[in-house]
Amino acid sequence: MSFALGVVGAGQFAGSFAKLFKAHPGVSRVTATDLLPERAERLVRDLGLDGVEPDFDAMLASDVDAVMMFTQRWTHGPLVVRALRAGKHVYSAVPMAISREEIGAIIEAVEETGLTYMMGETSYYNPITVLARRKLAEGAFGRVFYAEGDYVHDMDHGFYDAYAYSGGEDWKRTASYPPLLYPTHAIGGVLGAWDAHAVSVSAIGIPDTRRDGVFDRTVSMFDNDFSNATALFEMAGGGSMRTNEFRRVGLARGVPESRFVFYGTEAILEQNSGGTFWHAKSPLEDLSEQVRPGKGGATDESVLAGVAPELLDSFVSGHAPVHDISDLPESFAGLPNGHEGSHHLLVHEFVTAVEQQRLPAVNAWVAARYTLPGIVAHESARRGGERLAVDDFGNPPG
Ligand SMILES: NC(=O)c1ccc[n+]([C@@H]2O[C@H](COP(=O)([O-])OP(=O)(O)OC[C@H]3O[C@@H](n4cnc5c(N)ncnc54)[C@H](O)[C@@H]3O)[C@@H](O)[C@H]2O)c1
């Protein structure tokens, strides 16, 4: 069985994934649409895809079985619901949505249609998360009681160009996107290993001071002036998780922007800028080589056309030794990968979930646990750190 897929949003990130979907033996045909038709046309031309649809409605009316939703980060919720209601499986870029209501509507649509929804959380296949998942399954941590997940991405590291490409003339309105509304790389990297979820949060938002019109509440479409934020979550079953979402930060180039630490009663897994270490009440073990992403296969200019030069590194990193790549199709060999080797694994997970009519790893219920805590944390920060309850949509039925 193979299925047809439509690309919705042919911007900077779409090419990397469209190329892999097109190469996957489970996908028969890939078409594309964008509000700016020339972007869809260029993507189709550069990647040898199978045609352009004039707009989102036409894409939903077409005979594609699935869509990959790669529109701007604050737009996914309503578009995903419309796609599901039109009978399409959905692969969505992060975040799932930006409000509790939008998340609830996606879960309801998945329940009622029985279609596959997957959030493409790159951190789920971050080598540190993969390693932590394995150590947790082995029981090597004892009881995990504390974890840290950070997404530390300085605006000067490619984001000015990326938002200008994304937002058009009004780009500063959108570049103020609240850091805690992009929580999934940090939280997803922790919960991709630790079987827990947040039940309450207190967060601190740090107002920006650069005064260049970005993170300015009078300009921001999100009424946001926080450029950095920290949240502390209480976890179900006991335990805590801390996340940092920083957009004004002097991080060195080439070190990981998503970073994780897991504390257990018997062991600690600790990633920092210098490497990754395992403590098990015995001499410190250096696991850095196991989690170091390799080269990303052929660097392919066709998928990177709109990408800001400073972001290129993260779009081409390859697999790490800790990744299990034994199931990947041969047709992926040598194709561009990215974000610590996660792209190939994400595409394969979605295609096989649709084929096998099974839940993907980051299904709607899991995606909600990666996303909603950040939304509530942002509200807490807006209320001066007030501790707020985080709802849970539970486990998937069945
Ligand atoms: N590590 C990661 O997982 C990662 C990295 C980068 C980006 N992303 C996510 O990928 C998504 C896309 O990011 P990007 O940088 O490519 O954005 P982008 O702004 O470059 O591209 C988005 C495109 O969607 C189009 N669009 C918007 N609404 C549309 C609609 N209704 N119908 C058709 N087209 C529409 C826009 O015209 C634009 O060309 C974002 O949600 C972002 O959060 C994830």
Image (cartoon, rainbow, N blue to C red):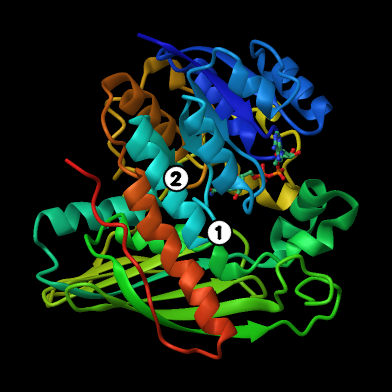
**Residue at 61%, 38% in the rendered image:** 70
**Front-lying residue, 64 or 166:** 64
Relative image position of residue 257 (x, y in whole percent)? 53, 62
Q: Earlier in the sequence, mark 2 or mark 1?
A: 1
Image position of 9 with respect to 133: above or below: above
Residue ID for mark 1: 98
Residue 150 visible in image: no
**Residue at 72%, 23% in the rendered image:** 43
Residue ID for mark 2: 106
Q: Residue 373 appears in which quarter of the rendering?
A: bottom left
Q: Residue 262 appears in which quarter of the rendering?
A: bottom left
Relative image position of residue 147 (x, y in whole percent)? 31, 73
Task: Tell me if mark 1 has few (under 14), some (14-19) or many (20+) residues whose alpha carbon lies within 10 angstroms of its own.
Answer: many
**Front-lying residue, 354 or 246:** 354
Circle 2 or circle 1, nearest the eye: 2
Q: Residue 133 appears in which quarter of the rendering?
A: bottom left
Disc 2 residue type (three-letter): Ile
